[in-house]
Image: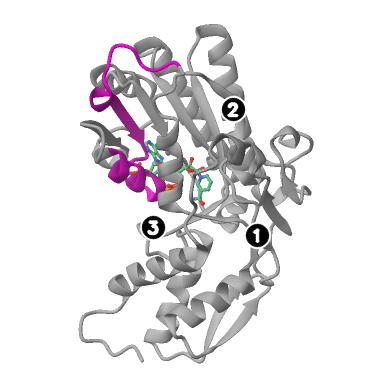
Amino acid sequence: MANYKKTTRQQLKILVLGGFGFIGTSVVSLLSKKYHYVQAASRKNGLNLLHEYPTKKYFQTFAPDAIINCAAHKGSVHYDLTYPADIAQNNLRMNLNIYKAAQSTCPKAVIINLIPNCTYPGDLLVQKENEWLNGPVHPSVWSYANTKRMLQALSVGYWNQYGIVSKNYIIPNVYGPGDSIDPQKTHALNGLIIRMLLAKRDSENTCEIWGTGKPKREWIFVEDVSRAIELNLENIQPQLDPINIAQNKAYSITQIAIMIRRISQFKGRLIYNTSYPDGAPVKKLNDSIFRSRYPNFHFTDLQKGIQQTVLYYQKLIYPPNTTTT
Ligand SMILES: NC(=O)c1ccc[n+]([C@@H]2O[C@H](COP(=O)([O-])OP(=O)(O)OC[C@H]3O[C@@H](n4cnc5c(N)ncnc54)[C@H](OP(=O)(O)O)[C@@H]3O)[C@@H](O)[C@H]2O)c1
């Protein structure tokens, strides 16, 4: 295995773009335990990736050995359908600026990209790497998913022309502590937890599920994403063909809702608001490549992950001394 030559393990300089976001926060927290130089960057602390020159200056100043690209302009399916032009434009521009800046200021840095599994063909039931581009993405995620396909194309072009090393990972829907509390912005499973806890707090008789509850999805706990990124961080071989970080398990939204209902002890009924689009019927990722490379990787059990997430949101939603029975 080829490793970074000039820097020892602890000295590796790691730049986490989108480092204050949902996944970025978890990545920073995990890697900071092992590496001295882990820098989170986003507009929050002055890095706007939409601007080419400031991005170059930032990369030049920090001089990263590894760039973990957790930055994106994204939202719910509804958001993607409402703002497709903004999503396309901003994601393409950010990713272009990242590669241009890396090429001109830190060409030895390894770039790690997180690609959502909605980039698979929309009608594929089990998403296997060799079928990744064998058809169009689902129309409900057209803009967002296609910019992520383009990100992988950029990584291939920059490797072929400039020798920039990238690693591309495909990940399913992420859940876990640390996400936004705004139900409109948060990710699907976390959003459902928030809505159920709010319904419980307000003694509602029902909790609304967006869509029919039938689509099946694969879920990954946010800390598992960070641990998977860390696995291969010091290897400088490119991984241009994306590999799934996967378990090959899918659960329907209704199954998940029933689990959350039991864990959060919400006593009301689940009702379905079918004016929300469902998206693709099934998204499950084949795990054979991941399993063969990392046979000892342990994924967090869904129930335990949901328990931790419910606890996290309970602390945010229930003020001290609130009765929640
Ligand atoms: N969450 C999932 O279920 C999931 C699944 C598969 C793949 N992914 C991928 O994983 C990555 C991280 O996702 P996430 O869920 O952590 O997203 P998130 O919580 O929305 O975080 C995105 C981050 O991008 C930053 N950002 C947006 N525009 C920016 C700009 N112009 N300049 C600099 N930073 C900017 C935001 O920070 P500021 O607003 O402070 O700038 C934010 O920290 C994304 O690439 C996403 O596609 C996520």
Residue 177 x, y percent position in the rendering: 37, 60
Residue 72 x, y percent position in the rendering: 46, 40
Q: Residue furthest top?
A: 161
Is the CB atom of the residue marked by disc 3 within 8 angstroms of ligand 1's nearest atom?
yes
Quarter of image, res 50 = top left
- Does residue 130 lie above or below 216 as drawn? above
In depth, the one of 156 and 293 nearer the eye is 293
Binning the other alpha carbons within 10 Å of mark 2 as few (below 14), some (14 to 19) or many (20 upward) gives many
Magenta residues (range): 2-31
Residue type highlighted by circle 3: Asp
Residue type highlighted by circle 2: Gln
Which residue appears at 30% of the width and 32% of the height? 47
Residue for badge 3: 179
Label 2 to label 3: alpha-carbon separation: 26 Å
Indicate which disc, 2 or 3, sits on the residue closer to the N terminus. 2
Binning the other alpha carbons within 10 Å of mark 3 as few (below 14), some (14 to 19) or many (20 upward) gives many
Q: Is residue 154 magenta?
A: no
Label 3 to label 1: alpha-carbon separation: 21 Å
Residue 109 x, y percent position in the rendering: 38, 18
Ligand 1: quadrant of the figure:
top left
Indicate which disc, 2 or 1, sits on the residue closer to the N terminus. 2
Which residue appears at 48% of the width and 18% of the height? 165
Residue for badge 1: 250
**Nearest to viewer (mark 3 / mark 1):** 1
Residue 86 x, y percent position in the rendering: 53, 41
Specify whether residue 126 is in view: yes
Which residue appears at 42% of the width and 59% of the height? 176
Residue for badge 2: 152
In terms of secondary structure, where does tag 2 sit? helix
In the visual, does 211 lie left or right of 28?
right
In terms of secondary structure, where does tag 1 sit? loop
